[in-house]
Image (cartoon, rainbow, N blue to C red):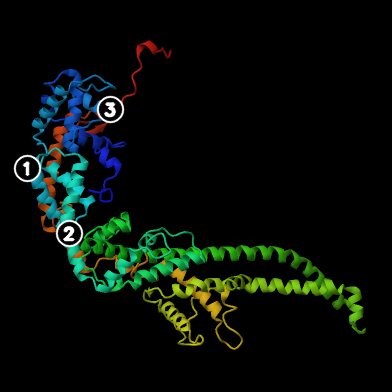
Amino acid sequence: MTAQEKFLSKRQRYQPISLPQSFSDEQMVKDWTLSESDREEIGKYRKNFRLFIAIQICSVRLYGRFLNQVHDLSPHIVNYLGQQLALPPSLAIDVPQRKATYTDHRQNILKHLGFQKFDGAIQEKLETWLEQQARLGLLPEELFQKAEHYLLDQRILLPGPSVLERLIIHICSNVHQQLFETVFQDLSPELRESIDQLLKVPEGEQRSYFQQLKAYPPAATISSLQSYLKRYTTVADTGIDNFEGRMLTPAFLEYLFKQAKRYSAKDLKRFADHKRYALMVCFLLETRKVLLDQLVTMHDQYLMNMCRKAKHLHEQRHRELRKRQKKAVDIVLDANTYLLDWPSDQPILKTDFWQLVDEDKFRNSLEDLRAFKQLEERGYGDLLLARYPSLRKYFAEFIKLPFAAEHGNDSLIQAIELVRKLDAGDIKKLPKTAPEGFIPRELRRALKNQAGQFNRNAWEMGLALAIKDALRSGDLYLPQSKQHVSFWDLMLSETRWQEIRTASFEELQQPQKHEVKAVLPQQFHDAVAQAKEKFPFDDFAEIQDGKLKLKRYDKIAVPPAVGYDLN
C-alpha cells in the first residue's frame, strides 16, 4: 500500500473513536444506558474499576472498539454512568495498571457482550463480503464505513483502522483490475499515443504536460486565460471526447481522477499498461470538466474586474467634469441672459457680445457641457469598448467552447455561431438580423451607426457580458463541465427515480408502501418496550398521575461551610 492509495485521514487512523462533544440527553440515554445484565456483570469487579468497566462495555457495544482515552469522555456521560451504578460523583476514572488485569477485563467484557476477536477466519469472510460490495461500485471510503457496520452487526471487535484500510485497498485493487482491463480495451491507438505524450517532458521544459494540468489556475488575466484555453484544447485534441466510458460511474470516475492526481508522471509510467491508461483516461475526462469550470470562472472574474475598473474610471471622470460643468452652466446662463436682455431694436454684433462675455471661457464652457453630456450618455460604454482589443485576445478561443442553451435562449447560441463564422471568415460582417436583445443599456448608443449597421466591437462586448450572466443563471451551460451543466441534467428521470426509490427503501430500512400499516405499529410497540426498560434509570423525567413531568437539573449544592443566613 503506497501513500497515494491511503484514504483515511490522520484522525481516522489514530483516533478511530470520535467521542461526542455535544449531544442531547436523549442521545446520551440511548447510547450510554446500562442494562440489568450489564450492572450485574459490573458488580463482579472491584468498586474502583466499575466506572471503567461500564465505559468499556458501552464503548464496545456502540463503537465496536475499546476506548483507550477514557479521560476524554464527557463528564456528563461519566456522571450518568456513575448514577446508574450508585457510585459517588468522581472526576477521575481508575484504570487497571497491571497488564494481566487489563487483558482479563477485556476478555470478560467481550464474553459478556458476545463479541468475537477479529481473526483469520473472520478476515476471510470479510474479504468475500468486501469483494461483493466493491463489485457493486462502492468506493474505499464508503466500503470502510460499511465494513465497520458489518463487523459491528456480527458482534466482532473491530480491528485497527489501518488493518481495514489495507484490506480494502487490496480488495479494491483486485476488483478494479478487471475494470482497468475493460477500459484499456476500449481505448483507441490515437488516444493511447496522446496519453503517452502527456506523460513525457517536452524539450526545454521541466515538467510534463500532465503535471501542468494538475496545477490550480492563477488570477484571471489575459495570459492565464490564454494558457488555460490552450490546455483545454490540448485535452480535447487527445480524442477523449470520443471515449464513451459507460462502465465508469461519476463517483468512480472522480475517485480515479483523485488517485491519478496523487501520482507523478514517473509513478504512472511504472504501472502496468491497463492501469496507467485507465487512470489517465479518468484524469482526462475529469480534467476536461474542471478546465471548463475554471475557464468560466476566469472569464467571469476578468469581465467583473474589467467592468469594475471601467466604472471606477467613469465615476472619477464624472466627478471631475461635474465640477467644471457647474461653472460652465453659470457662464452659459449669464451669456443667454445678456442675449435675452439685449434691446430688440438694436442689432447685436459678435464684438459687442464678446465685450460682455469672455470668449475663451464661453467656448471652454460649451466644450465642458458637450463632454459632460457625452459622458452621461455613453461614457461607461465607451470605456468598455476601449477594452475590447484586450478582450479579443482570449475571447476568440473562449467562444469556441461547446456551449448549449436552455429553451428560450436560442439568441445567445445564434450570436455565438455568428462570432465563430466571423472569426472563420465565412461572413464579413454582422447581418442586420443578428440578435441584439442581450446587449446592455450602456452599449446601446454605440451599437449601430447611422446606416443601421452593427458595430461589431459593441455587439461582441455585449455578447461577452451576456455570456457571463447567462452562465451564472444557468440559461447557458457547458454539457461537458461539472458545475455549469443543464438544470435538467441534475434531475432524475422517471425510470431512474423508480430505481433509486426502490433501492432507498432497502438502504434506509424503511417499509414499502403496502407494509407501512403493519410495520409502524410494531415499531411503536418496540419503542415503548425499550422506553419502559430504560425509563427507571432516567432521573430527568417521571410519570405522575399519568402525565409526563420533566424537571430541571439540580443546582450545585452549597456546602454548609460556605453557607450563610439570608435573614
Whichever of labels 3 and 2 marks the residue nearer the N terminus, that label is: 3
Q: Circle 3 is placed at which residue position?
A: 71
Q: Nearer the viewer, mark 3 or mark 2?
A: 2
Mark 1 residue type = Ala
Residue at the image point whose x is 14% and y is 26% from the top: 103
Whichever of labels 3 and 1 marks the residue nearer the N terminus, that label is: 3
**Residue 337 in sight here:** no
Q: Nearer the viewer, mark 3 or mark 1?
A: 1
Q: Are marks 2 and 1 in contact (CB under 8 Å)?
A: no
Mark 1 crowdedness (10 Å alpha carbons): few <14, some 14-19, many ≥20: few
Q: Is residue 83 above or below residue 159?
A: above
Q: Circle 1 is placed at which residue position?
A: 121
For numbered disc 1, what is the local secondary structure? helix
Q: Circle 2 is placed at which residue position?
A: 177
Whichever of labels 2 and 1 marks the residue nearer the N terminus, that label is: 1
For numbered disc 3, what is the local secondary structure? helix
Q: Are marks 3 and 1 in contact (CB under 8 Å)?
A: no
Q: Is residue 10 above or below residue 40?
A: below
